[in-house]
């Protein structure tokens, strides 16, 4: 899986625009959390849809971007956390080991 790096708040506008035609996945990830590392590895093994544009957000380095994503998509910040964006709206969000590639792919369809 080729992750796009989410490092700037301005990228959220681009994600909203991309989500008009494709589902966009934002994975909020902490490099210091074993659960986050596990959730990332599970997604990389199981998420097969080429229709989903994946973004990886390091919450330790880019907390301001993570906070803005939580505000914009009306979810409480958690990490790890998966947000699936369609037409500028969060249509799926889950955290920790409840993150499911199957559910993401279903919501993206």
Image (cartoon, rainbow, N blue to C red):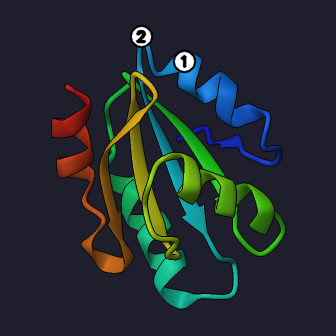
12 or 71, which lies in front?
71
Q: Position of residue 101 (x, y in %)?
A: 27, 52
Q: Residues within 10 Å of mark 1 (few under 14, many from 20)?
A: some
Q: Position of residue 5 (x, y in %)?
A: 74, 44
Name the image quarter holding residue 33: bottom right
76 or 61, which lies in front?
76
- Please give the name of the residue rendered at 46% of the width and 22% of the height, measured from the top-left corner: 19
Residue where numbered disc 1 is placed: 18
Q: Are marks 1 and 2 in contact (CB under 8 Å)?
A: yes
Q: Position of residue 48 (x, y in %)?
A: 32, 37
- Please give the name of the residue rendered at 62% of the width and 42% of the height, measured from the top-left corner: 3
State whether residue 16 is above or below residue 64. Answer: above
25 or 63, which lies in front?
63
* Count of number-bearing discs: 2
Q: Position of residue 105 (x, y in %)?
A: 23, 38
35 or 22, which lies in front?
22
Q: Is residue 92 left or right of residue 68?
A: left
Q: Label for residue 95?
A: none
Element assignment for label 2: loop
Q: Is residue 101 left or right of residue 77?
A: left
Residue where numbered disc 2 is placed: 21
Image quarter of the C terminus = top left
Q: Residues within 10 Å of mark 2 (few under 14, many from 20)?
A: few
- Please give the name of the residue rendered at 54% of the width and 18% of the height, measured from the top-left corner: 18
Per the model, the C-alpha gap separating discs 1 and 2 is: 6 Å
């Amino acid at each position: 899986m080729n992750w796009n790096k989410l490092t700037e708040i301005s990228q959220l506008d681009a994600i909203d625009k991309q989500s008009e035609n494709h589902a966009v996945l934002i994975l909020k990830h902490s490099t210091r959390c074993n659960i986050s590392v596990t959730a990332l590895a599970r997604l990389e093994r199981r998420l097969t849809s080429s229709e989903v544009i994946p973004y990886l957000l390091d919450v330790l380095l880019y907390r301001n971007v993570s906070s803005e994503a939580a505000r914009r998509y009306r979810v409480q910040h958690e990490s790890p956390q998966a947000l699936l964006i369609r037409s500028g709206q969060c249509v799926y969000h889950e955290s920790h080991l409840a993150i499911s590639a199957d559910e993401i792919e279903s919501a993206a369809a």
